Structure formats: C-alpha cells, structure tokens
Image (cartoon, helix red, strand yellow):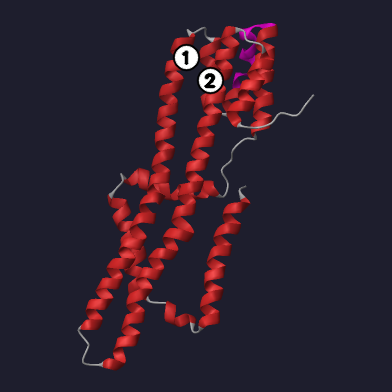
C-alpha cells in the first residue's frame, strides 16, 4: 500500500477545511449549482474524450495510487538472477517446472519464459515482448490521461461557473445588497475547480505516471533476463544490469 497517497490527499483537504472553518462560516463555501457545473461538467466532458471502457478504467485506476500491488525491486532482482543461475546450470528446459510460478508473478514474465523454453528465436521473443509492452504502456498511459484531462477540465468548468454567476449578478445591479453575496457564489466555482485539480487530479496523474514507468521497468527486466539466459550470460553481470535498470544499490554479499 502506498500510504503517501492517503496522507497527502487527506492532509491537503484537511488543511483547506481547517482554513475555511477558521475564517468563518463553512456554509458559505457550499453551493449546489456550483458543484453541478464544476464536478458534473468536468466528469461529463472528460467522458466525451474517451471510449466508455477506457474512461471507467481510468477512474478506477485511482485505486492503484493507494494499492499499486508492485513487487519489490530488490526481491525481483534476486528472483530473476536465481532463474538465470538455474538455467545456466541445468539448462533452459529446467525452467519448465517453474512456469506456473512465472505466470503467477506476472503473465508477461510467464509468456516470455514460455517462448524461451519452447525454443523460439530470441529476435521473435523480443518482437512479441515489445508489442505486448507497447499495449501495456498504452493502457496505463490512457489511465493517467483520464485524470490529466480532469485536471484540465475542472478549473475550466469552474471558470465557466464563475462567468455564469457574474452574468446573473450583473442582471441585478439595481440591488446593491445582492452584489456581495452574488460575487461570493460566482467565485466558489473557481475555488471548486482549483481544489479538485490541484489536490486530487494532478497528484493522481503524477502517481499513475510513476507507477506506469515502474511497471514498464519490470517488463524490461523480465525481457532482459530472457535475453541473458538465451545468451548464457554470467548471472552476476545480469544482476548488475538489473540494479542499474531499477536504480537501486545492491547489498554487498
């Protein structure tokens, strides 16, 4: 679980709420029409920009920022190096007995090892793996794009709501007592848009992009391992390459 997401979002919303309560009446910051324009308009316009399945998948991807389910890089490096050592000592066919474990860890790893065990040429394995990686990256990029789009649309609809409020206020210039409250309501939509974009959408987009890049790093590590096994490379060399790929420092043995 990525506790930083929960702490960051809760803390940001809480600080804003505390500021509102300290400054005066919280009820002044609640306006249903403004919520309908900003939140409803933002979600609706974003829906128009994506196929329905991708849009819903992108919204659900928010859960990945809390529980990404990513393996530990150091543990993965050790696991892959052990695979390479076993293949070098016992032969590639010895990995057949562990194929279910590969698929359980990651279907991509299972597919790469399946092709390697079946004796496919390494160039064909690389071609198939790169095609699969492109599809995975596209899916993950679309998930991030949904939240990035929401981050652009919420402030835009907040401004639209403000303009609507100002127009309605200007129609009542003959009543000076209504100008102050009218201006306040008009500005609330801008506030809603700014809060949703900067507290929720932008952090979510950044976190989804981070995990997208990390996911692709794991895929590259799996393919790199298959290449090393096929070439009969020294597992220690593979370990150094994998540590560089993940940007981690290995413990001295």
The residue pinned by badge 2 equals 223
Magenta highlight range: 90-100
For the residue labelled by badge 2, is the local secondary structure a helix, a strand or a loop?
helix
Q: Quadrant of the C terminus?
A: top right
In this view, the residue in front, 218 or 15, is 15
Main secondary-structure element of the magenta-colored stretch: helix
The residue pinned by badge 1 equals 125
Which of pointers 2 and 1 lies earlier in the amino acid sequence?
1
Tag 2 near tag 1, CB within 8 Å: yes
The residue under the point 55% across, 81% down is 22
The residue under the point 38% across, 77% down is 31
> Pointer 1: residues within 10 angstroms few (<14), some, or many (20+)?
many
The verdict on residue 41 being magenta is no
Distance from the alpha carbon under mark 2 to that under mark 1: 9 Å
In this view, the residue in front, 179 or 30, is 179
Image side of residue 216 versus residue 6, left or right? left
């Amino acid at each position: 679980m990525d506790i930083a997401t929960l702490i960051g979002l809760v803390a940001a919303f809480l600080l804003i709420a505390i500021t509102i309560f300290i400054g005066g009446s919280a009820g002044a910051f609640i306006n249903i029409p403004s919520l309908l324009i900003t939140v409803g308009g933002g979600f609706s316009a974003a829906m128009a920009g994506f196929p329905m399945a991708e849009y819903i998948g992108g919204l659900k991807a928010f859960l990945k920022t809390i529980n990404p389910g990513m393996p530990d890089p150091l543990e993965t490096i050790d696991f892959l190096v052990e695979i390479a050592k076993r293949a070098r000592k016992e032969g590639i066919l010895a990995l057949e007995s562990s194929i279910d474990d590969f698929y359980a860890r990651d279907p991509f790893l299972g597919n790469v090892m399946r092709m390697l065990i079946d004796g496919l040429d390494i160039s064909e394995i690389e071609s198939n793996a790169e095609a699969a990686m492109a599809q995975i990256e596209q899916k993950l990029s679309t998930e991030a794009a949904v939240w990035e789009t929401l981050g652009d649309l919420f402030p835009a609809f907040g401004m639209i709501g403000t303009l609507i409020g100002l127009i309605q206020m200007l129609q009542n210039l003959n009543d000076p007592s209504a100008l102050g409250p009218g201006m306040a309501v008009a500005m609330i939509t801008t506030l809603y848009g700014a809060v949703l974009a900067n507290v929720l959408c932008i952090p979510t987009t950044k976190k989804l992009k981070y995990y997208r890049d990390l996911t692709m790093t794991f895929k590259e590590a799996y393919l790199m391992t298959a290449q090393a096994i096929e070439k009969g490379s020294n597992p220690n060399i593979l370990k150094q390459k994998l540590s560089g790929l993940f940007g981690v420092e290995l413990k001295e043995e």
